[in-house]
Image (tube, rainbow, N blue to C red):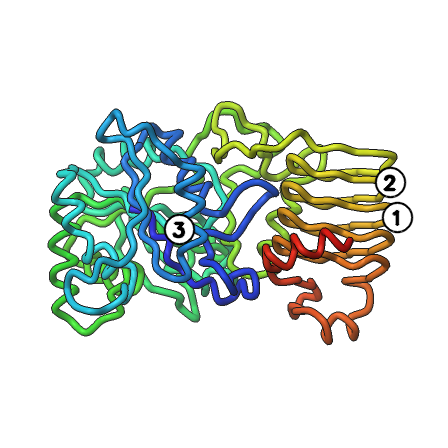
Amino acid sequence: MIMAGGKGERLHPLTRDRSKPAVPFAGRYRIVDFVLSNFVNSDMLSLYVLVQYKSQSLIEHVRLSWRTTGIVPDYFVTVVPPQMRFGPAWYRGTADAVLQNLNLIDDFNPDVVAIFGADHIYRMDVNQMLEFHVETGADVTVAARSVPRTEATAFGVLSVDRQGRVVDFVEKPKDPPAMPGDPTRALVSMGNYLFRRQALVDALLVDARRSTDHDFGRSIIPELVPGGRVFGYDFQGNEVPGVKPYEEHGYWRDVGTIPSYWEAHMDLLGESPRFDLDNRYWPVRVGAHPGPPARFIGSDVDNAQVGEASLVKRATIRNSILGRSVWVNEGAVIEDSIVMDHTTVGKGARLRRVIVDRFNIVPADSEIGVDPAIDRRRHFVDPSGLVVVPRGGRREFLSGLEEF
């Protein structure tokens, strides 16, 4: 069960027209592709994607990029909008989302149910977490990682004993409990869970009768800790094939803000990227793009990733990621920026620390990310100084090309 209904309010305006899992990432992916790839690479091929907020973009992406043959009944990636089986209500929380779809669990009849978030960038072999879950006899296993205590206030924080059993779970505490032996770090939940099926059903039914947040982190897990067998799985011990020595071990990013989203893109660049997308043994999967290779004509391109069907003509690109079908014209300069699919950058335009969403036309000789005062009048400027140009309209983009 992939929880893909998040609003992503802190990622606005990239989430103005789509949910957070549907936000494009790294030139050719959507954020949701990372968790789906982890399951497919782990040979776990029965995936329900639960959507809610502005879901059409995500639905179309899954339909086009995650098509399955239908020959094998247990191999599917299926989008599930709110079914409203218990009344005319949308999902009231992550636990309520699963509760409203218990019929899917009953129909499939699994031993273990995985409930993972859809809005993080990472690689993970889910089989290793499953082995830990089975060996410990857990009712629920929570994927966890250590972070500095100063950052732990944004997460659910676990306290575990020597066997890994969770003895306390606090959601977003102001004073996070430290890890044993290291007062500077805390063990936090990644929002990924494995449940023994009956333990999940029982917990959801009990929670449904109460006035709670109906959320796994705020309601279900804390209630199970005192009497249930709740274990924390150390994500740092998860080994994925093909990871290169220079990559950050246990790389995981919550790209929930504009700065974290931009920084995660910068982690993909350089001779020794913190997170190298070139991994043939554990690829990030996505549907093929029906376009030709990128073309470069008389350009200065350094430390950049450029998507298929893009055209760069006598322009300069440094430390940037361009999506598919991006046209960059003569004299344009793009630095430390993210330019998404189907965007045209006009002659002499200059972009610095800018995120340009899809279907945009950057006018000739314009400057974005150069003068903060001008940027605030024309665009969205994050407190970090990053400038975001919201998604343009496909129709306006096509008509603009005719005049370009």
- Tell me the kind of residue under disc 2: Arg
| Quarter of the image where one finds residue 388 | bottom right
Q: Percent position (x, y) of residue 56?
A: 41, 55
Left or right: residue 81 compared with residue 289: left
Q: In the depicted view, which residue is nearer to us: 82 or 338?
A: 82
Q: In the depicted view, which residue is nearer to us: 399 or 310?
A: 399
Considering only order in the chain, which callout, 2 or 1, is on the residue closer to the N terminus?
2
- Tell me the kind of residue under disc 1: Gly
For the point 53% across and 42% down, which residue is it?
29
Q: Percent position (x, y) of residue 110?
A: 16, 38
Give the CA distance from mark 3 to mark 1. Answer: 44 Å
Placement of 286 over or under 347, stated as above or below? above
Give the CA distance from mark 1 to mark 2. Answer: 6 Å
Residue position marked by numbered label 1 in the rendering? 331
Residue position marked by numbered label 2 in the rendering? 314
Residue position marked by numbered label 3 in the rendering? 190
